[in-house]
Structures are given as C-alpha cells and as structure tokens.
C-alpha cells in the first residue's frame, strides 16, 4: 500500500482557484486517453443504481470539468438519473453550455465541513479530483458525514513520487487508493483499472 504527498506545507497551489483561473478548458470526453475512464465512471453510476435498488438516483459531479461525464449521464431520463455538477475553472463553463448540462460554478472543497451552498446528492462523482485536493481523506470523510450514500471516483494508478503529473498533489498505487476509501468510512464495491487510471465505486459504511 503506497501513496505519496507531492507538495510541501498544507495547501498545494495546484488545488487552488488561483491556479485554475487561467487554465484552458480540457475536453476530456473527446480525448482518447480519458474517454474510457469517463465511460467506466458512467457505467459504475448506473451499476450502483441497480445494485442499490434505487429508482431515481441523484448524482453530483464534484469537479465536473467541462461537463463530459454529465453529458454521458444525461442520456438517461431524469426518472432514472438526475445529475448536476460543480467546478471552479472559468474556462469549463463554455462546455456546460455546449453540452447542455447542469454545471455550477463553485470552489466545492473550500466550503468547509458542511459544504455550504453546495447541493449534494445520493452519489458523488469525483473523476480525476482526489489527486488534486489538499486532503483527500478529509474530503471523503466530509461526504460521509454529509449523508452521501456512494461515491464513484478515479485517479491515475501509475504515478509515483518520481513520476507524476506536475498538477497533482497526491499519487496512489491501487492498494493506496483502496486504503484512502476504507480508512475514510467507505466500503469498496468495485475497483477497476482502465488504462493508466483506476476507477472505484464505494458505499458509505453506516
């Protein structure tokens, strides 16, 4: 089991709104390396809906980027899946309009323990998010405390302290990623590799 902290101090610059303020929109849905892990995340959302025998599942995409995953979930009628998302990178808002999805501008992980002003859902999605935040353990514990029932998340599985994206604050091998969830109040239901990424579906332990 291994994870690596890739920054000094308490708050990595790569997790801040200031870092993302002038970054270009990244249309991951149209990028070959990213599309498979977004398809897998959408699959796990629908899988969880049936696994948990939920009629209509509400989904919030925390760090929704330009709305790629939200557009995949929009293929389902709202009687099955109702989804919305949040992101704090200004350039991504263009994607919400083009894709016709419910994206909302907010710095989700700077709102404290109560997620003040953030509309949560039964299931929270965080694709390529937890490796960017200052404290991914606290994020997962706060979601658990807020009553979120399940999460679907993805992060790279091949990065280390010596080989990683400069924009990442953390790196996890598969065992380290699993431990992140299980030590934060979640039971892993599925944990799968998709290319260089790992995708997890987990349920809150109550």
Image: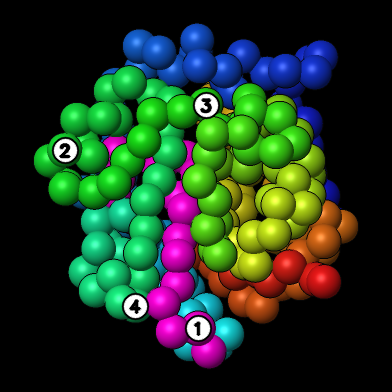
Please tell me whether mark 1 or mark 3 is closer to you in this view: 1
The local crowd at label 4, few if under 14, some if 14 to 19, many if 20 or more residues have their Cα within 10 Å, is some
**Part of the protein shown in magenta:** 53-69
What secondary structure is marked by label 4? loop
Q: How much space separates mark 3 and mark 2, taking CA atoms?
A: 19 Å
Counting from the top left corner in percent of width and height, residue 186 is at: 77, 65
- The residue closer to the viewer here, 159 or 200, is 200
Residue 176 visible in rendering: no
Q: Which residue corresponds to mark 1?
A: 54
Q: Which residue corresponds to mark 2?
A: 97
Q: Which residue corresponds to mark 3?
A: 107
Q: How much space separates mark 4 and mark 1, taking CA atoms?
A: 9 Å
**Within the image, what quadrant is residue 4 found in?**
top right
What secondary structure is marked by label 1? loop
- Is 160 positioned to the left or the right of 195 in the image? right
Q: How much space separates mark 2 and mark 1, taking CA atoms?
A: 29 Å
């Amino acid at each position: 089991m291994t994870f690596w902290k890739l920054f000094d101090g308490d708050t990595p610059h790569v997790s801040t709104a200031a870092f993302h303020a002038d970054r270009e929109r990244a249309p991951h849905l149209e990028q070959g390396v990213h599309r498979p892990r977004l398809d897998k995340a959408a699959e796990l959302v629908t899988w969880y809906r049936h696994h948990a025998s939920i009629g209509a599942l509400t989904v919030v995409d925390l760090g929704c980027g330009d709305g790629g995953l939200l557009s995949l979930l929009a293929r389902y009628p709202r009687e099955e899946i109702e989804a919305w998302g949040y992101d704090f990178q200004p350039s991504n808002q263009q994607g919400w309009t083009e894709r016709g999805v419910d994206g909302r501008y907010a710095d989700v992980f700077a709102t404290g323990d109560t997620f003040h002003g953030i509309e949560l859902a039964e299931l929270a999605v965080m694709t390529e998010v937890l490796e960017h935040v200052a404290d991914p353990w606290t994020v997962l514990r706060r979601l658990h405390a807020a009553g979120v029932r399940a999460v679907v998340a993805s992060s790279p599985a091949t990065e280390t302290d010596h080989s990683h994206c400069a924009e990442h604050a953390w790196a996890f091998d598969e065992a380290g990623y699993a431990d992140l969830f299980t030590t934060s109040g979640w039971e892993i239901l599925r944990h799968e590799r998709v290319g260089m990424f790992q995708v997890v579906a987990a349920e809150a332990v109550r």
